[in-house]
Image (cartoon, grey):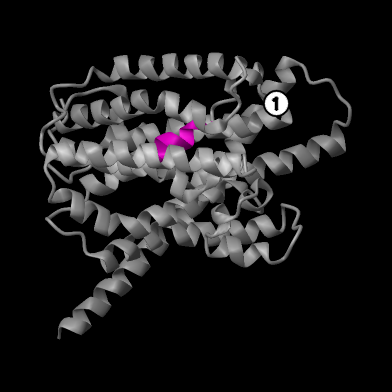
Amino acid sequence: MTSPRTVGGNLPRLTSLRFFAAALILVFHARLIHIVPGGRLFDLAHMGVAFFFVLSGFVLTWASPGERVEPRRFWVNRFARIYPSHIVTLVVSLFIMPITYWWLIPLDAFLLQAWAPYERIAVSLNAVSWSLSAEAFFYFLAPWLITTLRRRPPRTLVVVAVTWLVITVALGRTVTLMGYAEWPYFMPLARSSEFVIGVVLAELFRRGHLRNHVPPVQVCVLACIASYALAMVVRNAGVTMKMAASFISLPAICALVVSSALADVRGRPGPLASPLLEHAGRVSFALYLVHYMVIAVTNDLMDTYLPGTELGIPLRLALLTAVCVVSWICAEALHRGVEIPAQRRIRSAYARRRARART
């Protein structure tokens, strides 16, 4: 039996689940170069991004103590968490990915690419960094959003979440009718409802309102699988909008996040609470950043050494295994060599600056 967690404490199951979401997205991209057996089954695996957005809102709210979130400290911590690794992988991508326009580099460097209404811009260079562009917008809003919602009654929190979701769905539909069918999936404003829902869930959870209304983690996992299957049925029926799949799975994703947090708070044992999976979850951000470039290099090597070759299942599995292993090695290097030391140095420098300001 692990020890119970207090409000704001570590939630190992949620950290572990980050790894599975990142792995799902890796497979989603690997299927594009036809190395995933039964790859059509993973056509909607991009829903792992929706899980990341909900989880981000939940964890940041859970980890923010007190009645007020101090914006500058919050932004410094978020900057230290994502930006150094983003810049390193962006530089690496310049040597790997084709550059159509040089002005895309500053757009990506300042995490503005997801505000462009075209997919070819949003996923330029290191394609997966479009989600960091959305997260940067969420982080900008978060201090005020969390502080404001922390002072509101539970009913108001629910109204805010539902209203925000309706508005963003309407926004996405409007943008689609204007001729920008790709944009709602990438647009930070349209995707912000998932983050806001995560914030509201965490705030309700902090107050104890959800702790008797969620099924066990295993049931929630099955619900996620069932919702994925339903999304596949809807897609095969002709609904091709990417956001439709995310909305179908959103209730199951929310239930899984809350159920996992509840199991951690109560100190329940389980495989998701294992140190190995928790470490994998910590490395998942680096894995997310590097895997697309590894897949791109693999595709180039296949074009060079296996042109026109019919890939059987054994060869596909071998290539997929190689992609996973190389991606993990690169992720560990990025995590240990950039992410951790950069966070320490930036946060330490900020703490010293605050100390000097006080004296």
Vertical position of residue 79 compared to residue 27: above or below: below
Q: Is 153 within the magenta?
A: no
Q: In this view, does 161 lie above or below 262?
A: below
The span picked out in magenta is 46-53
Residue sitting at 15 percent across and 82 percent down?
358
Position of residue 114 measured from the top left corner of the image (x, y, whole percent): 55, 52
SS for dot 1 = loop
Kind of residue sitting beneath label 1 = Ile
State the quadrant of the N terminus. top left
**Residue 177 relative to residue 305: left or right:** left
Q: From where the camera sits, is residue 234 visible?
A: yes
Residue at 18%, 24% in the rendered image: 268
Q: Is residue 330 left or right of residue 191?
A: right
Disc 1: which residue: 35
The residue furthest bottom is 359
Q: Where's the C terminus, which quadrant?
A: bottom left
Residue 101 position, x and y percent, is: 74, 62
In magenta segment, residue 51: yes
